[in-house]
Amino acid sequence: MRDVAIIGVGMIPFGRRDEDSLLDMLAYASLKALDDAGLGDKSVSAVYVGNMGAGIIQHQTSIASALVDRLSLLPAAADVVENGPASGASAIKNGLLAVASGYYDYVLVAGGEKMREITGWRATDFVATMTHPQVEYPYGITLPGMAGMFTRLYMEKYGVTREMLLAVTLKNQEMGALNPYAHVEMSLDREGIFDSPHAVVNNPVAADPLHLYDLCPVSDGAAAVVLCPLEMAKKLSKPPVLIAGFGQATDTHTLQERDDPTDLKAVTLAAQQAFEMAKMKPSDIDVAELHDAFTILEIAESEHVGFFKKGEGGKAALAGKTRLGGPLPINVSGGLKARGHPVGATGVAQVVDIVWQLRHELPENRQVKNARTGFTINFGGFGNNIVSFVLKRVEL
Amino acid sequence: MPLDMELEAVLRPMQYPMPPYPPKVITLANGKKMVVRQAKREDVPAILKSVHPCIFIERDYYDIVSARLYGELLAWKRYRVKSEFCLIGQVDGYLVGVVNSRMENEKVGMSYHTLAIDRGLRIGSHLFAAKMEYHMEYLNQEEVLIVAESPIGFRRWMIEYPLEKTNIPHELGGGDSYRLTREIYFKAKPRLVVGDRPVPPDLLAEAEAEIKFADDDTIRERIAGLKGR
């Protein structure tokens, strides 16, 4: 198997993109990534597109074929990868395997979703289609509902408090306010969403004990990366970023079948696989993008991947250890909380943000100093399909 | 041409007495302080400067809401609508939202429009709540008839309170009216109606000194831009 590097990345600002179709967004992000890769007259041999909902929301299928044609990349192979909110990272994994195997040299991976053309409750229903069709969905469960129950259990078992969740919210919004790609490019204020009695309106309960600002927004957006063998990447101008490790693991479809619903086993396994492949450990990581669709997930994932012991993740967030400048900055992009969560795009966007960090291309107020290694978790279902990457800057 | 006050007396509708709405201040999610106060007729030209650019924004029915609000405020300024009132929200003096409504009779209120000129901070929710507060707690009305023109309005008013559906036509047209009763209002009040009184003098003085308005492009970007929520 060959080592695989990321040689080009692109993203478009997330938000509400009424004027752009899903295909437009995928094309814009892809063109940026291809341009960034500087392939010259070389072309990609295959395109993988991470997307969860075009068939449901846009009533459009086969978007990878459409994208290849739009980008004049014919006759490149084209596949859509659907893995719920982990579609983006799954698409990268498929591209990675294709290059590592030696079958393709240059591969484009794009992730995108257009969710704002439907009402919020229809978007919530769309995301809930990944729940169990017999024992969960018919009873009205939603992902925020699951996250609320998970949070309550996590609070009881590990002593997580609302103050800890609030620390994640404020941190990620503060960083999102600095990120031009973020959907919610706005800082929040502790008084306005927590201390003041007016917070009851500003930050109402969404799924007890989670409040509005514990949840990520519903967004439109797209991101893309270009992959190739590391040896070929070394001939290009920008420092390549090695995909040093990846992992993917699954868990039971329903939460109720898990021995301990607070134990995100698939997160632990996916992370272990990625670290093992990279021959690294959690303490070797300089910057991480975790899947904070709900603030509790950033805390829980930070523990399950081994950055902190169980019960310590919330305390670490509260103590500022995961802030920019802290020992392990997490979600410096603003995370899903602020950057937004166009589900098929998220896993790719996380990798794009880490690549920018490892290339040291971000402005000082967002750059983790001297970052050499990065880590991502893309969280599918409610923890039933997790994809993880360890990325490493390669010095030429 | 000077007004013919004899003719005006015929053309102008009667006005129910309305006690003033006491101003209040609300802390927003971003920490900014929004002063909510009752507008005066002479404030209308300044308010319309911010409403005008919204007339050309199709997103979320801003065009309909703004065009109607524009006409309603003009009608109020020139005494062609009965017992209308207007409340405004200001942050650092800048107009961030407008609501208007009127008394149909002493017992029934007729809600007109809610326009948030900045988004993502629940300004519309706060101002709509202030409007209902005025109807219920200061005008002491029995009920307010309400319709929504946008799905967002439907979610904020009909679902969040939740309002009671009626088969009574609303004077704005559209679907049948929903009704806010005193019972519904006071039940919803703890989770939807907030604000501190009195407003600190410096904040109130700043708000009353001038209604500042953002330029058209800024307003359009806030409402219909990429980050418009």
Image (tube, rainbow, N blue to C red):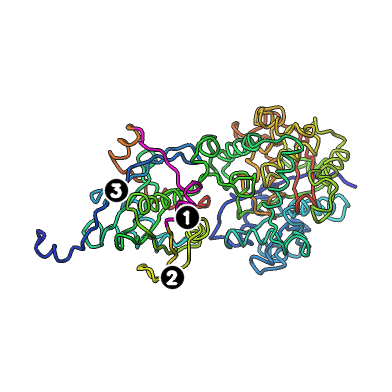
Residue A5: % across, % down: 79, 44
Q: Residue B183, located in which quarter of the rendered image?
A: bottom left
Residue kind at label 1, given as amino acid type: Ala
Is residue B101 within the magenta segment?
Answer: no
- Depth check: give the residue in front, B83 or B211: B83
**Kind of element beneath mark 2:** loop
What chain does mark 2 sit on?
B
Q: Nearer the viewer, mark 1 or mark 3?
A: 3
Chain label for disc 1: B
**Residue drawn at (33%, 44%) of the image:** B37
Q: Which residue is mark 3?
A: B39
Mark toward the start of the polypeptide (2 vs 3): 3
Tell me the element at label 3: loop
Residue B176, numbered circle = 2
Task: Indicate which disc residue A33 carries.
Answer: none
Q: Which residue is mark 1?
A: B224
Q: Can you tell which quarter of the image residue A294 is in?
A: top right
In the image: residue A134, left or right of residue A27: right
Q: Amino acid at mark 3?
A: Ala
